[in-house]
Structures are given as C-alpha cells and as structure tokens.
Image (spheres, rainbow, N blue to C red):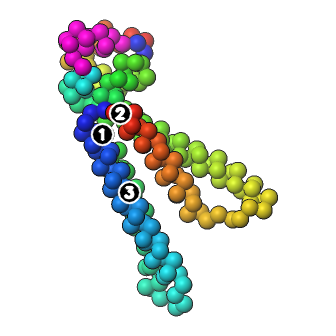
C-alpha cells in the first residue's frame, strides 16, 4: 500500500477511535438527559446529542474514501456491503429469536454491528498493505 | 483479465512501489492488478499504457 494511503487510513482510524469515545460520552449524557422529567428543549438536545458524533463518523469515513485510490475504494465498498449483509442476516435471525423469548434489542445495535464489521474489514485491509 | 504488467515492470527494474508511485495509486493496487485480482478502471489502464508506451490491448488481454 502506498505509504500515504496507509497513513491516510491510519489517521482515519485514529480519528474514528476518538470520535467513538466522543460518541460514548454523548450516549452517557443522552442517558442522563433522558432521566430528566420535564419535556424541555434542553432534554431533547441532550437526547439527540449522540447523533452529531454519529454523523461525524460517517463524514470521516466518506472523506477517507474520497482520498483513496480506486482499488482501496472498492475494498471499502466491499467492507460496507459485507457489513450491510451481516446486519440484514442478524436482524432477520434475531427477530425470530425474539419470538423464542430473547430480549428485544434496540435499533441502536444495528449501527454498532455495522461499524464493528466494517472496522474489522478495514483493519484487515490496512494489515494486508504492509 | 490477463496482463503483462509484471513483465513490463520487471524489464525496467521497477518495484511495485516504484510503479505505484508513478501511477499515483497504492502498492496494493499494483499488486492486485498484477495478480489478476483487480481489473483497473479505464483511466488507470490508460495511465499504465502511457507509462509503458504501449497500447492498452497489448498490455491487457481478456
């Protein structure tokens, strides 16, 4: 992998990791905000706070995608497609498992699974470019 | 698609990294093209042909 492409993806991973931490912090604030009684605009803002780092994750990834060459872009798209397929299968299977009595999962898990599968693929891509 | 990129590169004593630098792509991309795992886009195929001063069909064969 061209040094700057590898460097670019490593920078993206670092920024991604930092944004995940911001996301987790925002979720903690969101959880606290949801315990507030009054339906105030402040409560709504606190609850919607994790959306911002969530969008930033997408923005960081799209920016990295645009800066890569065509083969790496293809590999990133394949990683995204695999993540989508895994989530589709998981969602289908889990729906039936819920009917069997497993606890209902929040839709927020879908995003977590997508990013986890995508990141595993990206780590493999960066490792293969050494 | 088969291609003669490894041979043409070897004739010039270029490494994959050298070729990648001239084509402004990653070494991984050059490796994928050489091993037939990836067929380059038309613009990249033209860039390869121009670099080796050959026609595209002389380098890439279906």
- Residue sticking out furthest to the bottom: A38
Left or right: residue B12 compared with residue A107: left
Mark 2 highlights which residue? A129
Percent coordinates x, y for residue B36 in the rendering: 42, 18
Percent coordinates x, y for residue A2 in the rendering: 27, 33
Q: Quadrant of the C terminus of chain A?
A: top left
As rendered, which of A106 and B47 lies closer to the eye?
A106
**Residue at image point 37% right, 39% down:** A126
The reply to whether residue A107 is in sight is yes
Write down the chain letter for disc 3: A
Badge 3 density bin: few <14, some 14–19, many ≥20, Cα 10 Å: few
Whether tag 2 and tag 1 are in contact, CB under 8 A, the answer is yes
- Nearest to N terminus: mark 2 or mark 3: 3
Left or right: residue A26 compared with residue B45: right
Percent coordinates x, y for residue A115 in the rendering: 48, 52
Percent coordinates x, y for residue A17 in the rendering: 38, 57
As rendered, which of A86 and B61 lies closer to the eye?
A86
In the image, residue A64 lies in the stretch drawn in magenta? no
- Residue sticking out furthest to the right: A100
The magenta region covers: B3-15
Disc number at residue A17? 3
The reply to whether residue A48 is in sight is no
The image shows residue A103, relative to residue B1, as above or below, that is below
The image shows residue A108, relative to residue A91, as above or below, that is below
**Residue at image point 19% right, 11% down:** B12
**Residue at image point 47% right, 71% down:** A27
**Residue at image point 20% right, 13% down:** B13
């Amino acid at each position: 992998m061209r040094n700057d492409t590898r460097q670019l993806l490593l920078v993206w991973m670092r920024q991604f990791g930092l944004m995940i931490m911001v996301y987790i912090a925002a979720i903690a604030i969101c959880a606290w905000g949801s315990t507030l009684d009054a339906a105030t605009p402040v409560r709504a803002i606190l609850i919607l706070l994790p959306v911002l780092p969530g969008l930033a994750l997408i923005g960081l990834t799209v920016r990295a995608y645009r800066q890569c060459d065509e083969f790496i872009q293809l590999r990133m798209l394949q990683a995204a497609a695999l993540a989508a397929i895994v989530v589709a299968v998981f969602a289908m299977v889990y729906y039936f498992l819920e009917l069997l009595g497993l606890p209902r999962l929040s839709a927020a898990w879908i995003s977590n699974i997508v990013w986890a599968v995508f990141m595993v693929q990206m780590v493999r891509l960066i490792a293969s470019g050494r | 698609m088969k291609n003669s990129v490894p041979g043409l590169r070897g004739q010039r004593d270029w490494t994959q990294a050298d070729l990648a630098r001239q084509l402004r792509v990653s070494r991984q991309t050059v490796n994928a093209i050489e091993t037939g795992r990836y067929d380059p886009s038309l613009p990249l195929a033209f860039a390869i042909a121009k670099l080796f001063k050959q026609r595209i069909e002389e380098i890439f064969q279906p």
